[in-house]
Image: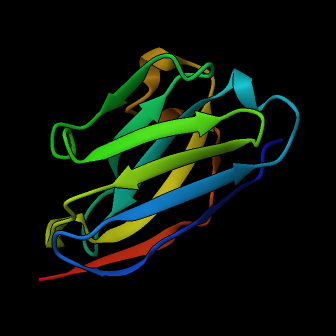
Amino acid sequence: QVHLVESGGGLVQAGGSLRLSCVASGRTFSRYVMGWFRQAPGKEREFVAAISGSGSTTDRADSVKGRFTISRDNSKNTVYLQMYSLKPEDTGVYYCGAQSRWVERSDEHEYDYWGQGTQVTVSS
């Protein structure tokens, strides 16, 4: 069982930055692929970024490439999402998830564990 808790969301102006954190419980954190997803009002949850268990491999959605960076610190059981040059369309609830297969990293249905989410609002 893995318990995930996100933090770091908030209200920011367009062009600003935020760093989200997701802390996981348990002693097997490094075994999990960690992903960030977001859900805007009235829209489906969408993939944002993922990182392999070791942290050596990452992937990001085209919409955030060049602006968002995912990283992890396995000694702290924490995964981060650093967001730069934020746009109003980045607004939504951001969730972190954990699962075991890299090949399924962008499929929300393959994630076994989810946090409660953290709200990010970007004003224009």
Residue 111 in view, yes or no = no
Q: Quadrant of the C terminus?
A: bottom left
Query: x, y percentage for residue 102?
Result: 49, 18
How is the model colour-coded?
A: rainbow
From the viewer's perspective, is 48 left or right of 115?
Answer: left
Up/down of 8 relative to 97, above or below: below
Residue 50 in view, yes or no = yes
In this rendered view, identify the residue nearer to me: 42 or 118: 118
Residue name at image x 16 percent, y 75 percent = 14
Q: Quadrant of the N terminus?
A: top right
Residue name at image x 30 percent, y 47 percent = 68
From the viewer's perspective, is 38 left or right of 43?
Answer: right
Q: Residue furthest right?
A: 27
Up/down of 103 relative to 27, above or below: above
In this rendered view, identify the residue nearer to me: 77 or 38: 77
From the viewer's perspective, is 113 left or right of 109?
Answer: right
Residue name at image x 57 percent, y 56 percent = 21
Write down the quadrant of residue 18 in the picture: bottom left
Query: x, y percentage for residue 122?
Result: 24, 77
Up/down of 56 relative to 81, above or below: above
Up/down of 20 relative to 101, above or below: below
Residue name at image x 27 percent, y 57 percent = 84
Query: x, y percentage for residue 116?
Result: 61, 66
Query: x, y percentage for residue 90?
Result: 23, 64
